[in-house]
Image (spheres, grey):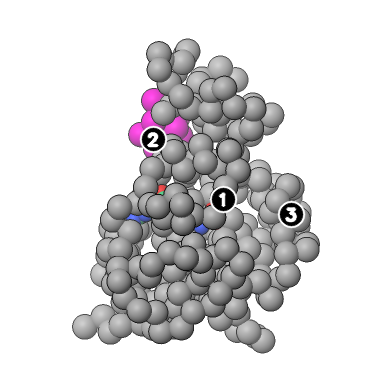
């Protein structure tokens, strides 16, 4: 997976290389997917597919959900515990394309996103920057921070009080999190919510997250109030650990775990 260079700015090329991805002048033989700059944004293209994947916080599905998605009544908002004056500080340790994080930020949460896939990070960064330029949405993404790295390692750094490197927005003065949110890829496609063709391509590029269970313990040490694990409705619980509470959604379940001591 790499960036097809035609049309991309030198800054974008530099950033892609810094994320560890190659630049391509032409598609290598056998490539099934590639990143490219088109329609004034970074897009993930799948050869032979019309639809592409890009992060758009200003228009499309994100705008629709922000206006008509049910606000604080949405299961994800209830799951993280938004209520009255209380808006939790959230650490989303499996950020993906930032859709859940954006919903929470649009409801007032400060959200720190960790993502380890360079492809997802490149798409996210591009979407966050374009959103920054929009007067209304700029305020929302002003509450979002992005860290490129593995959730296990970045959680360990936060727990040890070590610094982490932010690619978007300055660090929080004190990185304390009320909620740690986990939504790793679920390995069994028969239990996953049906996704559009383009999103299926994203899942193919990112791959499964076979180490997902290992995130639960450090997440429970990190969270001051709760850990929320997003799962397909009929999927088994994470790491075989029974949740302390559950919020049901239509096709999705939010399993809640109480914090564990750091000692
Ligand atoms: C199902 S997607 C998350 C979707 C996201 N909630 C959204 O709203 O767009 C799972 C993402 O978690 C990332 N991920 C899984 N395990 C991770 C880990 N240990 N550290 C960082 N990212 C991880 C994957 O790379 C993938 O992009």
Q: Which region shows up in magenta?
A: 13-22
Q: Residue at x 54, y 77 (%)?
A: 247
Q: Quadrant of the C terminus?
A: bottom left
Q: Earlier in the sequence, mark 2 or mark 1?
A: 2
What secondary structure is found at the residue carrying circle 2? helix
- Mark 3 closeness class: few <14, some 14–19, many ≥20 residues within 10 Å: some
Q: Are marks 3 and 1 in contact (CB under 8 Å)?
A: no
Q: Say which quarter of the image contains residue 252.
A: bottom right
Please state the horizontal and vertical placement of residue 216, each as a whole percent of the image. Answer: 33, 69
- Mark 2 closeness class: few <14, some 14–19, many ≥20 residues within 10 Å: few
Residue 63 disc label: 3
What secondary structure is found at the residue carrying circle 1? loop
Please state the horizontal and vertical placement of residue 258, each as a whole percent of the image. Answer: 39, 83
Residue 92 falls left or right of residue 75: left
Q: Residue furthest toward the left?
A: 263
- Residue 66 seen by the camera: yes
Find the distance from the CA under tag 2 to the CA under tag 1: 33 Å
Residue wearing tag 2:
18
Q: Are marks 3 and 2 in contact (CB under 8 Å)?
A: no
Magenta segment includes 16:
yes
Q: Say which quarter of the image contains residue 236.
A: bottom left
Instruction: Establish if 36 lies above or below 28.
Output: below
- Tell which of 235 and 108 is nearer to you: 235
- Tell which of 221 and 65 is nearer to you: 65
Residue 209 falls left or right of residue 248: left
Residue wearing tag 1:
194
Find the distance from the CA under tag 3 to the CA under tag 2: 31 Å
Q: Say which quarter of the image contains residue 16.
A: top left
Magenta segment includes 72:
no
- Residue 142 seen by the camera: no
């Amino acid at each position: 997976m790499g960036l097809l260079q035609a049309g991309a700015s030198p800054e974008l090329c530099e950033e892609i290389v810094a994320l560890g991805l190659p630049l391509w002048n032409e598609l290598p033989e056998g490539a099934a997917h590639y990143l490219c700059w088109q329609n004034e944004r970074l897009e993930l293209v799948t050869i032979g597919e019309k639809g592409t994947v890009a992060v758009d916080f200003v228009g499309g599905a994100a705008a629709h959900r922000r206006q008509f998605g049910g606000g604080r009544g949405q299961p994800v908002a209830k799951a993280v515990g938004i209520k009255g004056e209380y808006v939790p500080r959230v650490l989303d340790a499996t950020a993906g394309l930032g859709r859940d994080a954006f919903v929470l930020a649009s409801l007032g949460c400060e959200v720190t996103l960790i993502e380890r896939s360079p492809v997802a990070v490149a798409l996210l960064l591009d979407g966050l920057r374009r959103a920054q330029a929009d007067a209304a949405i700029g305020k929302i993404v002003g509450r979002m921070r992005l860290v490129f790295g593995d959730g296990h390692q970045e959680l360990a750094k936060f727990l040890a009080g070590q610094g982490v490197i932010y690619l978007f927005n300055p660090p929080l003065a004190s990185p304390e999190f009320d909620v740690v949110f986990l939504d790793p890829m679920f390995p069994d496609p028969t239990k996953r919510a049906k996704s559009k063709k383009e999103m299926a391509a994203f899942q193919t590029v990112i791959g499964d997250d076979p180490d997902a269970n290992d995130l639960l313990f450090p997440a429970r040490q990190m969270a001051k109030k709760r850990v929320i694990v997003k799962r397909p409705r009929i999927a088994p619980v994470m790491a075989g650990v029974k949740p302390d509470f559950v919020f049901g959604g239509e096709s999705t379940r939010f399993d809640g775990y109480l914090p564990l001591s750091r000692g």
